[in-house]
Amino acid sequence: MPDLKVRLVQKDENNNDQIVAEGTYDKVNIVQQDTDGKVEGEVYVKGPAIFKYYFNKDEATRKAFDSHGYYMMGDMAEYDKKNNTFRILGRSSVDIIKSGGYKISALDIEAVILHHPFVSECVVIGVKDIEWGERVTAVVVLQSGKKEEDLTLEQLRDYCKKKLPAYQCPTQLKIVDKLERNAVGKVNKKELIAKLFPPASNNKK
């Protein structure tokens, strides 16, 4: 969409918006740059094809748009200056795990684990933890014929380390019989966390 304007935005310590990159489909300017030419932030968009407001819902509109009229999508993305590409990292509310000072994409980890020969289905979630903020937790359905003892946390971590840095590898593994999905085939990660890791158990080491 030629007329679409895009921003990647991070929050500072006072919860104010800090633009790290902005531009159009063919030209993006990095405002704050990491050493590798990549920046991450929440995706804000604005343009003729983007809706302007929620009908008769002023409060919802206020929460959905910033003061400049950009729609705050709720998705986190990475912009790569070298390749001039955006990569969606996931929903900021459930797919971005904050662990040990890192912001980790659950989708990246899921993509690796799903290639494990013993794994049929997988979701990765952040479970609250006193020490780490959140712990990277893999919830896995095994392939037919495989048993829980066939895949240990250490085995899964060793597998993930071949593709991911150590801080992205799961520190918890939960094997389940099935993953409940909604009508469009998605797992509600918030409900899954509440079911498998209720608040009383979240801070157990």
Image (spheres, rainbow, N blue to C red):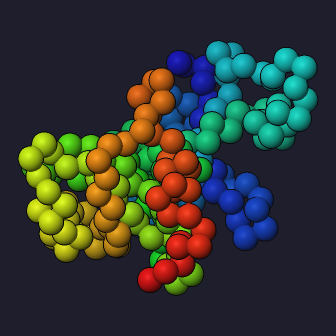
Question: Which of the 4 image quadrants contains residue 54?
Answer: top right
* Horizontal side, residue 188 vs residue 10: left or right: left
Give percent across and percent down for residue 179. 37, 42
In front: 86, or 147?
Answer: 147
* Horizontal side, residue 98 vs residue 172: left or right: right
Question: Which of the 4 image quadrants contains residue 44?
Answer: top right
Give percent across and percent down for residue 125. 44, 57
- Would you place residue 29 above or below residue 149 in this image? above
- Would you place residue 149 above or below residue 186 in this image? below
- Residue 115 in view, yes or no: no
How many labels, in total?
0
For the point 63% across and 37% down, the residue is 73
Give percent across and percent down for residue 154. 19, 74
In front: 108, or 158?
Answer: 158
- Would you place residue 2 above or below residue 196 in this image? above
* Horizontal side, residue 59 vs residue 155: left or right: right
For the point 31% across and 65% down, the residue is 173
Question: Which of the 4 image quadrants contains residue 164?
Answer: bottom left
Give percent across and percent down for residue 205. 44, 83
